[in-house]
Image (tube, rainbow, N blue to C red):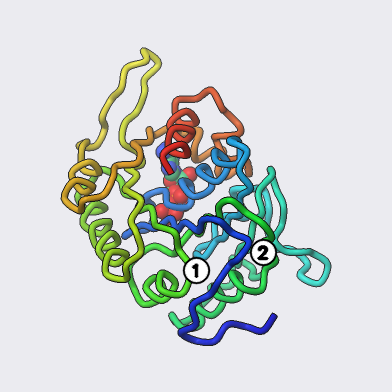
Amino acid sequence: MSPPMPGQKFSLPGVKHVIAVASGKGGVGKSTVAANLAVALHMHGQRIGLMDADIYGPSVPMMFGLGLVDQTRTPFPIERQGLKLMSMGFLVDPNQAVIWRGPKVAQAVGSFLVQIPWGDLDFLIIDLPPGTGDAQLTLSQQAPLTGAIVVTTPQDVSLIDARKGVRMFQEVRVPVLGVVENMSYFVGDDGKRYEIFRSGGGKKLAAEAGVSLLGELPIDPRVAECGDAGEPIVSKYPDSVVAKAYVALAQSV
Ligand code: ADP
């Protein structure tokens, strides 16, 4: 298949739903949410692809215990834990900073969409780069998105940017499926729920924007451990409070 043309709207005939996971800011857990949501949906028997469009800071390889691969010998997408995965991190050494401008990023991501044989999928989850710049805008307009999920943390700094994210999708008429508040609370050994940061921000943002609050996910140090060790928490600790919150999230998507 030929590479996509600039401005082209791509089509993915074998994919039922294409969902972008976005955030206004980096570090709020967007990639973690994308990966764990993908695993949770797969546990529900869905056929899932996970495309890492975060060209500058690809996280999918590490979260699934992968890294650079020999492109000449590896068929893409790479299958792991029942998911079909694609990431720039399979192709470019993470230590070589990828210094690309927006249009080139959009082109690379367009190639991932069009040239990778995704086959038949129920959901293709796209882990978007953080922010609401040109690259994100182009992607949102070119990818055949069913909808977008905006991830935030409870703090105002994150909520302000998440609001911009919601607005960006609304402007380009991509349905916002809802907001996910990550790192909402912590469950202590006593089983009690502690709200470390001021809570309720995600709920307020969702209400203001007229979209759903899809979930509030707890903070748990094992989320980061699992992310670094190559197996998302949903599959590693399926009985954890976090995993159960993801299962509920998958049901609401
Ligand atoms: P982003 O994609 O928004 O930049 P990441 O998904 O890479 O964010 O998450 C940033 C860091 O926070 C990672 O180390 C990740 O493991 C950790 N993290 C994300 N969500 C949680 C959580 N609910 N509890 C604990 N750590 C988390």
Residue lying at the far bottom of the rendered structure:
5
In this rendering, would 20 be left or right of 72?
left
Residue 187 position within the rendered picture, expressed as x and y whole percent measured from the top left: 36, 23
Q: Is mark 2 within 8 Å of ligand 1?
A: no
User: The C terminus is located in which quarter?
Assistant: top left
Q: Does 227 sit above or below residue 3?
A: above
Residue 11 position within the rendered picture, expressed as x and y whole percent measured from the top left: 55, 71
Number of labels in the image equals 2
Q: Is mark 1 within 8 Å of ligand 1?
A: no
Image quarter of residue 198: top left
Residue lying at the far right of the rendered structure:
73
User: The N terminus is located in which quarter?
Assistant: bottom right
To which residue does mark 2 refer? 90
Residue 38 position within the rendered picture, expressed as x and y whole percent measured from the top left: 55, 46
Image quarter of residue 164: bottom left
- How much space separates mark 1 and mark 2, taking CA atoms? 13 Å
In this rendering, would 9 be left or right of 174?
right
Q: Secondary structure at mark 2?
A: helix
To which residue does mark 1 refer? 56
* Image point (20%, 53%), residue name: 209
Residue closer to the observer: 22 or 188:
22
The three-letter amino acid code for the residue at tag 1 is Tyr
Local crowd size for mark 2, using a 10 Å CA cut-off: few (<14), some (14–19), many (≥20):
many
Residue 42 position within the rendered picture, expressed as x and y whole percent measured from the top left: 60, 41
Residue lying at the far top of the rendered structure:
190
Q: Secondary structure at mark 1?
A: loop
Local crowd size for mark 1, using a 10 Å CA cut-off: few (<14), some (14–19), many (≥20):
some
Residue closer to the observer: 19 or 182:
19
The three-letter amino acid code for the residue at tag 2 is Phe
* Image point (72%, 52%), residue name: 79
Residue closer to the observer: 127 or 253:
253
